[in-house]
Image (tube, rainbow, N blue to C red):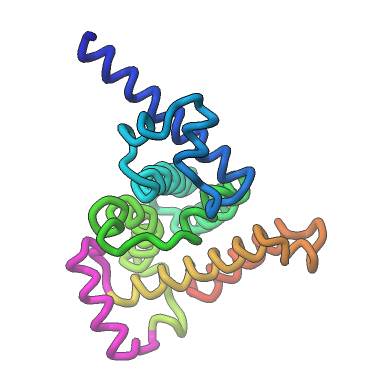
Amino acid sequence: MNPDRREKKRSAALDEIRATAWKQIGAMGVQALSLRGIAREMGMTAPALYRYYADRDALVIALLVDAFTSFTAALETGRDTSNADDHIGRLRAMCKSYFQWAVQNPQHYALMFGTTIPRQLFAQELGPVAQRSFLVLQGVIGDAYKAGKITGELTSLRLPTQLKVQYEALKKMGMPYTPMVTHLALAVWSTMHGITSLYLYQYLAGFLAENVESFVDFEIEKIIRMMGMS
């Protein structure tokens, strides 16, 4: 077989396997994800499927790479709806994109933040992809900080020594921002993750009925206000 044709055939098979896996996750949850079940649905034998993914962990890593890549693209798209000097607009749109992407892709979000990955596999294959999504957020806050747009009480707080040392260590791992910027980025991420998770697990709707979006928008404005952005 022509090498190009062979590669196209392999790529198409990989895409179909991942699409079938997402379908299985959507129907039964990530815990039910099974290579044998995927092979059965695709009309393949299990040994044939193992030629594409050595084991379940390998498939989960591939799914996570797809999910984090899509997530990062959504954050970047939200960020880029505002000009580079509109720091508030960029942060506001990016936070909203975080929530909207998760609502549109709940299985992806649950897999990203609800799956335990062996440390070695995370470092080797997934870490750099997952880190890029955080760097988008960190970059927006870092640009605002350098431009003097983050003011108020937060900037005068002194980080605990242990945290400062840890944040300095993260700079060696490709997060080239000051400890305060890294802390603010983690704080914003934690807030958005908490809001998003409460919504996806049906808690917010119980309190807020049809007013969830107003709540999300208000909380994003509160983040901006708390950071003293101007």
Determine whether, in the image, residue 18 is placed left or right of residue 161.
right
Q: Nearer the viewer, residue 91 or 111?
A: 111
Instruction: Tell me where residue 133 appears, x and y as whole percent.
Output: 38, 54
Whole-percent x, y for residue 13 in the image:
39, 25
Residue 80 visible to an observer of this rendering: no
Viewer-nearest residue: 200 or 28: 28
Residue 167 visible to an observer of this rendering = yes
**Depicted 169 relative to depicted 22: above or below:** below
The residue sitting at 61% across, 65% down in the picture is: 195
Q: Residue at the spot x=22%, y=9% of the render?
A: 2
- Rendering quarter of residue 8: top left
Q: Which residues are magenta?
A: 156-178
Q: Does the stretch in magenta take in 170?
A: yes
Does residue 205 belong to the magenta stretch?
no
Residue 83 at x, y percent in the picture: 43, 46
Q: Is residue 79 above or below residue 14?
A: below
Name above or below for residue 59 compared with residue 205. Answer: above
